[in-house]
Amino acid sequence: MIPELDQHRAEIAELCRRFGVRRLDVVGSAARGTDFDPVRSDVDFLVEYVPEATPSLGAFFGLRDALAKLLGRPVDLIMASGLRNPFVRAEMERARTPLYAG
């Protein structure tokens, strides 16, 4: 996992609480760390919301934008409930690193 995520763990947890996130995991190159390009790579997150806090579109993009601002780079949010393809899900599971569980 890239160091910036550990450095901002407390702020990430606060954002998760504010936006009703149950679980936030980093996936992809930022989770692996080995193929992450600090100049060009974005950070991919797999997000699960608490059942009673299903986000509006504005809240979903609000979380994405707040994470991007905090990390100083583009962020992609992927809803765990939207992962239907078993091959994509399996690939994400291989490099899934938990950041927040509330």
Image: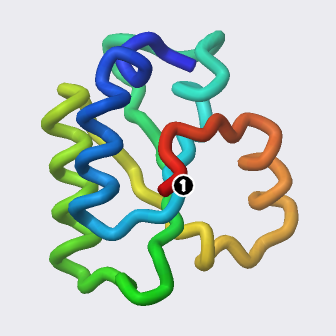
Colour treatment of the image: rainbow
Q: Above or below — where is 6 with respect to 58? A: above
Q: Position of residue 66 (x, y in %)?
A: 17, 48
Q: Above or below — where is 23 with respect to 96? A: below
Which amino acid type is marked by label 1? Answer: Leu
Q: Quadrant of the N terminus?
A: top right
Q: Position of residue 29 (x, y in %)?
A: 58, 27
Q: Quadrant of residue 54?
A: bottom left
Q: Residue furthest front?
A: 102
Q: Give the class, few, some or many, for how many residues have Cα within 10 Å of label 1's Cα (few <14, many ≥20).
A: many
Q: Above or below — where is 47 with respect to 56? A: above
Q: Quadrant of residue 31?
A: top right
**In percent of the image, x 72 and y 48: which residue is there?**
92
Q: Position of residue 45 (x, y in %)?
A: 48, 48
**In percent of the image, x 36 and y 83: which residue is there?**
53
Q: Quadrant of residue 40?
A: top left
**In percent of the image, x 22 and y 61: which residue is there?**
18
**In percent of the image, x 30 and y 31: which residue is there?**
10
Q: Position of residue 24 (x, y in %)?
A: 50, 51
Between residue 68 and residue 23, name the one nearer to us: 23
* Drawn side of residue 74 relative to residue 78, left or right: left
Q: Secondary structure at mark 1?
A: strand
The residue singled out by tag 1 in the image is 46
Count of numbered circles on the image? 1
